Image: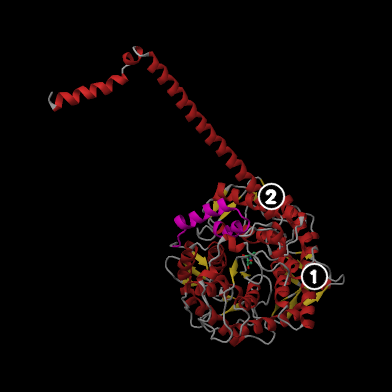
Amino acid sequence: MGRRSQSSSSSSTAWRHLSPWYYLKRPARLALLVVGFVAATFASWDRLSLVRDYEAEISRLDEEVNRLYDQLRMAGIYLDDNPNIENIIKKHHLEVDPVNSVRREKVKEAMLHAWNSYVKYAWGQDELQPQSKNGVNTFGGLGATLVDSLDTLYIMGLKEEFKKARDWVAESLEFDKDYEASVFETTIRVVGGLLSAYDLSADKIFLEKARDITDRLLPAWDTSSGIPYNRINLAEGKASNPGWNGGNSILADSGTEQLEFIALSQRTGDQKYQQKVENVIRQFQKIFPSDGLLPININPHSGAVKSYSKITFGAMGDSFYECLLKVWIQGNKTESVKHYRQMWETSMEGLLGLTRKTSSNFYYVCEKNGDSLSEKMDELACFVPGMLALGASGYSPEKAEKIMNLAEELAWTCYNFYQSTPTKLAGENYYFHGGQDMVVGTSWNILRPETIESLMYLWRLTGNKTYQDWGWDIFQAFEKNSRIESGYVGLKDVNTGTKDDMMQSFFLAETLKYLYLLFSPPSFISFDEWVFNTEAHPLKIVTRHGNEGSSGDAEVQSTGLLLMPSDLYRHDKGDPP
Ligand code: DMJ
């Protein structure tokens, strides 16, 4: 037989095994085939059901692990590489406080409610109008609420929400806007929010975006004195001051960018940001009065103050003083930043001079117009108790005690701004006519954070849990009056409880974050390692050596700076300083 007919005969032999007739003629083989088929079917079915069972078991265990992990977080314990709970408690000196755990969870739930409402109705826009269920671009369309919320989401362990926000930043956040942005608001919310997200997550996208927006802000510092204009067109780089202020720059708006710009220089290695803001402080030194109280209006060309303009620790003055202290802390309290502390201490003497007390012992900080005192205090000035408490430890023990006492007295006043109204929410400002007790002036409440902020500092720095209880009272008043189905709103009037239609981005950035920290162990985002900007964005303190010049002396340690989540939860000190 030829090769062709041989191969066709062997292939027909193989094919015959596929023919039913082959098996019908051979019953033994048919039986064997059926048994084999049934056995294989059972084996595969059994295997599939085993895989399904295992998968169900794994997912059940996963849920159990997550539940236990949440319980640990609620108890203030953050697992690192050592899962032995006894060791963790011992190592971190943690107190498991069930009251705090419950409170913290409630605050986290409030954040989720605010965040989910923003996601649903205003995703990517600056702020949510909860009653109208609309988004509005109050900051030029920079996703202000989203960027302001990044670190709060991270800190509260809301990983999926953080990831979604992070992807929006990477894919959709852009700054080429034909919009006159506030240099101050953009710095504290957007630059601060991005830098904080970078320090917490080590994700470089945040640093890139922070650098992009800051480069667009920089032309604002191109004035003859170097004191910045307060507004800038982000697309064109054209800077100016608003006409309503006579062309002047505002103190708080011009002197509060230091933390963010210094942090950016430290993280990029580019000194230009730091140089711009350090020059502003040098200019302020030239005009710094002996009581350390700068009027709120400054001419950016001559660098001179408008001497009869207002002096205040409230609106338009406030964060300048806070910034002086915090740059000193950010700079490791070294020689190169000593002048910030000196200026701050001088200003605190000025603050003592503005402080009065009512017949029923409420301390308050007055404002000054020219030579006359005005017995008015903004709720905005309620950051002062926290600032004093934070700065107290740099004084001699006797002076520190005096400063701490004043901090506690002022916090009592601020708490009573809330307690004294029918809604238990504070108005925007208060009058103390002739030393009489507080009377609400402007009666709105826009979900501001300052009192909560101070309570958080005071609780951490005194260990007195009363401050936590006060914070809880305020939180409950927000829940009662400000929470609606589609977010949180402010009140047009704290006497009647009439609601407004705005969820301010700082409610998520500051108010809820400070509340969460108020009920967390002090070692969590500790004051030894982090400094909070005026919008409550924690920036990591970078090692800075003692005697070098003021610029370029920071030790940029990318590996030390870039925190992974596990680093964030690794705490060495558990007690208040
Ligand atoms: C925030 O944007 C900042 O805290 C700023 O320093 C003052 N105003 C609001 C909150 O009230």
Expressed as whole percent of the image width and height from the top left, the position of residue 76 reads 70, 58
Q: In which quarter of the image is ligand 1?
A: bottom right
The image quarter containing residue 466 is bottom right
In the current view of this chain or complex, which residue is farthest to the right? 359
Name the residue that disc number 1 marks: 432
What segment carries the magenta color?
146-175
Instruction: Locate the C terminus by quadrant.
Output: bottom right
Residue type at the position of mark 2: Arg
Q: Is mark 2 within 8 Å of ligand 1?
A: no
Q: Is residue 172 left or right of residue 197?
A: left
Expressed as whole percent of the image width and height from the top left, the position of residue 551 reads 52, 82
Expressed as whole percent of the image width and height from the top left, the position of residue 404 reads 77, 75
Local crowd at mark 2 within 10 Å, few (<14), some, or many (≥20)? some
Q: Is 438 within the magenta?
A: no
Local crowd at mark 1 within 10 Å, few (<14), some, or many (≥20)? many
Instruction: Locate the N terminus by quadrant.
Output: top left
Taking depth in this image into account, of 139 and 211 the one nearest to the observer is: 211
Q: Is residue 357 left or right of residue 145?
A: right
Residue type at the position of mark 1: Phe
Q: Earlier in the sequence, mark 2 or mark 1?
A: 1
In the current view of this chain or complex, which residue is farthest to the top? 25
